[in-house]
Amino acid sequence: AGCVSRILSPIYNTIYDYGYGVLKSTLIEDHKTPIRSGDDSVELHPVKISTLALSLDQITKIKTKLRVTVNDVITGTVFLGARLYMQETRKESGHSRSTALVVLNTRNIGGYKSVQDMLNPDNKSIWGNQFSFLHAGLPKLVNGQYSSPLDFVAHAQRLIKRKRNSVAAYVTGQFLEMIRKLRGPEAAARFIH
């Protein structure tokens, strides 16, 4: 049963993540929240940049307690911060449908090559970075569902771990490349937008 699960789980996760990503890009919209206005051309709106300093000692303690990676702790903390901000600004947005678009450099899937290797006429590698993205749903804050920030970070880590057990980012990257080749870079940019 464990062997079958290890084989079928990535296949299921890939189909689910890729299908959900296509639906999120075409049909399903997130709710309007303090961090998603739903307005057109938001890239032209004024931007406010905030910073937050996190203690590496605290991150390491959380990492050790939850038995997760530093990236898991940071991702969970960013998700929690976004949810808390949303809930503080508009109470009902703590349980709204909200998605983080995680941009990934997928070039390392094929491995990095030195410049000398890339200049080789027999080189089959693609120049430059190759990117893809994943839709990662932010865990909801519903009626104290998470008794502590640690519970929230642990839940976010489980969501990200499931996405790691999928090749949807690679499939999405290949889909974007196909759109770029068939319809041009503008069509690929429209899809991403």
Image (cartoon, grey):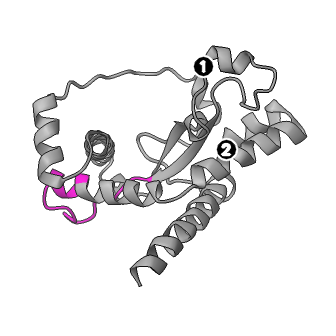
Q: Quadrant of the C terminus?
A: top right
Q: Which mark is residue 114?
A: 1
In the displayed structure, would residue 54 be above or below residue 78? above
Q: Residues within 10 Å of mark 1 (few under 14, many from 20)?
A: few
Q: Residue at position x 57%, y 62% from top?
A: 14
- Find disc 2 in the rendering and name its residue: 173
Q: Is residue 136 left or right of residue 45?
A: left
In the displayed structure, would residue 154 be above or below residue 119? below
Amino acid found under the numbered disc labelled 1:
Ser
Q: Residue at position x 30%, y 46% from top?
A: 72
147 inside magenta stretch: yes
Q: Residue at position x 74%, y 48% from top?
A: 175
Viewer can see residue 132: yes
- Distance, label 2 to label 1, CA atoms, is 22 Å
Q: Quadrant of the N terminus?
A: bottom left
Q: Residue furthest bottom?
A: 1
* Nearer the camera: disc 2 or disc 1: 1
Element type where label 1 sits in the image: loop
Q: Which residues are magenta?
A: 137-153
Viewer can see residue 97: no
